[in-house]
């Protein structure tokens, strides 16, 4: 297989990993793709189509990662809001030891 087509195939596989939220596998695959790309050296003219397609796939992968990051940030913000609400409910649940009607103490 042509090494440039191999890079494209790896990037497309990474796109699937990102869509499935398989972040650890994605990180490992991306690191391997970068290592392989660095070892190839300058691309020949025959690699142009593969590299143009690779650029599109990389843009899509980057967009997927940016969306996942935004979703995670939103979830973390919601957790912070939830903790404040729980703390408010906990404070309201304290029961006074005296002063209730029919209190036998």
Image (cartoon, rainbow, N blue to C red):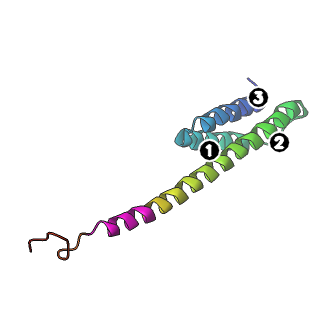
Looking at the picture, how far across and down is residue 28, in whole percent? 57, 41
- Quarter of the rendering occupied by the N terminus: top right
The answer to whether residue 47 is above or below residue 90 is above
Q: Residue 31 carries which label?
A: 1
Quick one: label 1 or label 2, which is nearer the N terminus?
Answer: 1
Looking at the picture, how far across and down is residue 77, in whole percent? 54, 59
Question: Which residue is at the front of the view, 54 or 67?
Answer: 67
Label 3 environment density (alpha carbons within 10 Å; few <14, some 14–19, many ≥20)? some
Say whether residue 30 is left or right of residue 93. Answer: right
Circle 2 — which element? loop
Quick one: label 2 or label 3, which is nearer the N terminus?
Answer: 3
**Residue beneath the point at 50% across and 62% down:** 81
Q: Looking at the rendering, which quadrant does residue 21 occupy?
A: top right
- For this orientation, the residue located farthest to the front is 102
Q: Name the residue under label 3.
A: 5
Label 2 environment density (alpha carbons within 10 Å; few <14, some 14–19, many ≥20)? few
Label 1, label 2: how many angstroms apart (C-alpha)?
19 Å
**Residue beneath the point at 71% across and 46% down:** 62
**Residue beneath the point at 80% across and 40% down:** 55
- Quarter of the rendering occupied by the C terminus: bottom left
Circle 3 — which element? helix
Say whether residue 42 is left or right of residue 19. Answer: right
- Please tell me whether mark 1 or mark 2 is closer to you in this view: 1
Looking at the picture, how far across and down is residue 54, in whole percent? 78, 36
**Residue beneath the point at 33% across and 68% down:** 92
Magenta-drawn segment: 84-94
Q: Name the residue under label 2.
A: 42
């Amino acid at each position: 297989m042509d090494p440039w087509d191999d890079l494209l195939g790896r990037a497309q596989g990474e796109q699937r990993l990102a869509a499935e939220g398989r972040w650890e596998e994605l990180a490992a695959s991306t690191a391997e793709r970068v290592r392989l790309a660095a070892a190839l050296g300058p691309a020949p003219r025959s690699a142009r189509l593969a590299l143009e397609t690779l650029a599109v796939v990389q843009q899509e992968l980057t967009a997927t990662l940016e969306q996942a990051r935004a979703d995670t940030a939103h979830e973390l913000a919601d957790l912070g809001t939830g903790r404040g609400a729980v703390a408010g409910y906990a404070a309201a649940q304290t029961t006074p030891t005296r002063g209730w009607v029919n209190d036998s103490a």
